[in-house]
Amino acid sequence: MAEHATTGRPSKALRRVLVPLALAQFICSFAGSNMNVMINDMSEDLDTTVQGIQVAITIFLLVMAALMIPGGKLTDRYGRKRLFTLGLVVYGVGALLSAAAPGLGVLILGNSILEGVGTALLIPPVYILTTLLFTEITSRARAFGAISAMGGVGAAAGPLIGGLITSAISWRAAFVFQALVIAAIVLLSRHVEDPLPADPTRAFDTGGAVLSSVGLILVVSGILATDNNIWLMLGLVAAGSLVLLWFFRSMRAKERAGKEALLSTSLFRNRTSNLGLITQNAQWLMLMGVSFTVAAYLQVVHGYDAIQTGVIFTAATVGLLASSLGAERFAKRRAQRTLIMGGFLLTTAGIVVFLTMVSLAVSKESTSAWVFAPGLFLIGLGVGLMLTPSVNLVQSAFGEELQGEISGLSRSVSNLGSSLGTAVAGTILVAGIAATPERSYGLALAVLALVGVVGLAASAMLPRAAAPVTTAQEATA
């Protein structure tokens, strides 16, 4: 299953391997966004409240945040393919249980717990296997481009697909759809080979896993509480930060004692990786923040339903697909630093275009759905352009020995960005800072544009050229 040395293009066997990996990212991203349009139907059917369904969504996010780093580390001990398959099975069982849920408690068990655990187990292997199997930088960019595209489509089209399934059949059918996709991935991944043998004797830092999980749960809980109680938010984030500081100190102590920690401190001494993680966080913050703000604006101000909103978001999906699927071609022509900077510029410009077009339409007292398309297309184009090189930079900064650790850390940083994006936008919308509700949406988008400027500054500090390395020693030298 090797790449062609002369062309750098992956073999047919490798291209077949990419299909289940990309589908896995799609279904996990879909699960994270499609429930937003089913909240009312689910609350009525399960005889609970909207707040109850939102609690289930929150627990899902917390479980993912808590277990992503331990999930990445476990791949070294039990094998990447085995953890990937286990995660798919756990996720599939959770989806079926959610589809048959008689009440909120079973929904939380199926969706929040089992699907959350399954996601944390299967997502790190997706990125590790891609890094290890696609060894040439342009083919790796192509692979990550396909995975990023499917993830972006899952997140952007999740509300549309979920809304269509719910309207045509039932919200339960949306979970059956997830289970069917999972079954297809299990079948397609039968021939995926793990390029590295598992090491059952490798130590696992249980204490570090507990500390990192508690710290991340507290931080994410604080972020999610931002638009409800600012003091609760500050208290939770402060407590989470202290626990994470304890976790980092324990890592250093274990390494000095010659023991294996959950994360190697060498991960944080790589300048390229550190800057790449910052850009990843900013990208997902912008993507989810813009998605939340624009979706709320379209539904609250213009009265569009979930399906109409999803159709309008197709412009962003098309832009994201176009740039993500061209990742290999872009990687051959431009440095990854250039692509990331270009992505932040395009995304920020897209926000400015969106605000300009909407304000002009409002002044003319006629707002057509086409007004939203140019800005959303540019936003999708920019996000798709920079997601792939950021992931490629971070994963390629380390050799085989640290792939499990950097993959879990990378996914946690991205998830934090997603949570921050929704929290920042939600806080601005409910705070009543602007004179009118409409201006609150504009203010939220303006703040997200400023995040794009911060991401642009971080990407400008990246090295002008970065090539993949083969060992951990080279990566951290």
Image (cartoon, rainbow, N blue to C red):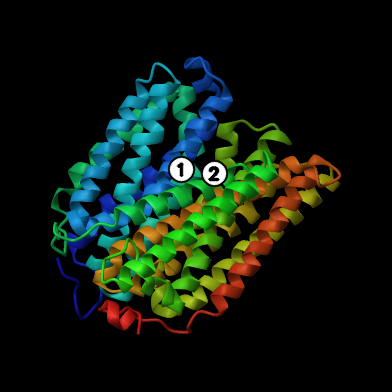
Q: Which residue is mark 2?
A: 221
Neighbor class of circle 2 (other Cα within 10 Å; few <14, some 14-19, many 20+) is many
Seen from the viewer's position, the closer of residues 210 and 96 is 210
Apparent side of residue 260 relative to residue 411 in the rendered image (left or right)? left
Seen from the viewer's position, the closer of residues 388 and 454 is 454
Please state the horizontal and vertical placement of residue 380, each as a whole percent of the image.
54, 56
Query: Quarter-wise, where is residue 172 in the image?
Result: top left
Q: Residue at x 59, y 56 (%)?
A: 286
Viewport quadrant of the N terminus: bottom left
Q: Secondary structure at mark 1?
A: helix
- So how many labels did they put on this image? 2
Seen from the viewer's position, the closer of residues 464 and 58 is 58
Label at residue 72 = none
- Marks 2/1 in contact by CB < 8 Å: the verdict is yes
| Distance CA(mark 2)–CA(mark 1) | 7 Å
Q: Secondary structure at mark 2?
A: helix
Query: Quarter-wise, where is residue 124 in the image?
Result: bottom left
Q: Residue at x 24, y 70 (%)?
A: 400
Please state the horizontal and vertical placement of residue 355, each as a whole percent of the image.
73, 54
Apparent side of residue 243 relative to residue 438 in the rendered image (left or right)? left
Please state the horizontal and vertical placement of residue 203, each as a whole percent of the image.
21, 59
Neighbor class of circle 1 (other Cα within 10 Å; few <14, some 14-19, many 20+) is many
Please state the horizontal and vertical placement of residue 103, each as a whole percent of the image.
43, 18
Q: Amino acid at mark 2?
A: Ser
Q: Residue at x 47, y 58 (%)?
A: 244
Q: Residue at x 77, y 46 (%)?
A: 440
Look at the image and tell me whether residue 180 can be seen.
no
Apparent side of residue 428 relative to residue 62 in the rendered image (left or right)? right
Q: Which residue is mark 1?
A: 62
